[in-house]
Structure formats: C-alpha cells, structure tokens
Amino acid sequence: MSEKIEARVIEIIDEFHLVVDAGEEAGVLRGFKVYLFSEAHDVTDPKTGEVLESIEPIRKARLEVTEVYKKGSLCESFERETFPPIFSTYYNITDQLKYFRTVKSMRALPIDKKEATGNWPSFQKIRVGDKAVIFPPKEEEEDEE
C-alpha cells in the first residue's frame, strides 16, 4: 500500500502519545508515519477586515504508529539524530563513513495540556480534531525534517 490515509486526532494522551481515528480497517500498520497539519486559514487586516493572505496547512508534527487497533492507532512522537563515527587516520575515510549511526528518541509534542487525558498505560498546539495523514514507511528511512 502506498496511498496516504486521512485521519483525525481523537485523543491526546500526553506530550508523546496520541490516538488517531484510523486503524486496521483503514489499512494502517505498525511503523506507518503520521503527519499532523494545521487547518488552512485566512490572515486578515485587523483594521479593514480585508483578507491579506490565505495560508495553506502547515505540518505541526511527525509521529509513528506504535499500536494498531480495529478503528484507531496509537502514535508516538519521535526524532532521529545521526551521529558520525569517530574518524581515524589509520583507516580509509570512505569505509568509516559507512558507520554513521542514527538514534531514534521520543520528542515532546506541543500539545494543549488541558486536552491531555493521561488515560493510556512550528509551536502550534496539537488539538483533538487535527488532520492527520498516515503513510507507510519508506524502504530506506529518511529524515524529512
């Protein structure tokens, strides 16, 4: 499956976890990537009320599906950091470049804490109802931030 799956945030658990309304029935699998977006909106002049600009949706966060249920999925925020190897003059530099390593760690989401339930064992707030787009993981993981 290579098509995106449209979903919405239905529960915010804490700064690291939330639930979207797409699961097994929608074809979601563990490891799928989830991107949260702001709504499109108009910027208006406060004095004249004139619409100055229409702002397209902006990506708020990137998560990964960690648990899949029939109609929903638990998602976890994360970030990846790549660390270079310790270089040595004794070895070929090309061979050493193969040993870059990537570390995945949790990343706190900028949530509205009033909406976090705690019911589970760009700086915009993430809210219930936010649009989520889910994609299958790429064969070779790439950091898109």
Image: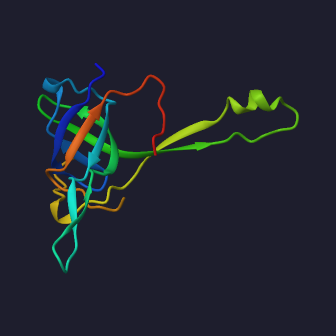
Judge from the rendering whether residue 125 lies leftward or rightward of residue 7; answer left or right.
Answer: right
Furthest residue in direction right, as rendered? 90
Q: Quadrant of residue 29?
A: top left
Quadrant location, the N terminus: top left
The residue depicted at 20 percent of the width and 58 percent of the height is 41
Furthest residue in direction bottom, as rendered? 47
Furthest residue in direction top, as rendered? 1
Q: Position of residue 62 (x, y in %)?
A: 35, 45
Indicate whether 49 appears above or below 17. below
Judge from the rendering whether residue 72 lies leftward or rightward of residue 85; answer left or right.
Answer: left
Indicate whether 33 appears above or below 122. above
Q: Nearer the viewer, residue 19 or 94?
A: 94
The residue depicted at 16 percent of the width and 34 percent of the height is 22
Indicate whether 131 appears above or below 112. above
Q: Nearer the viewer, residue 125 or 114?
A: 125
Q: Position of residue 96 (x, y in %)?
A: 74, 32
The residue depicted at 34 percent of the width and 62 percent of the height is 123
Q: Position of residue 16 (x, y in %)?
A: 31, 51
Q: How many marks?
A: 0
Q: Position of residue 145 (x, y in %)?
A: 46, 46
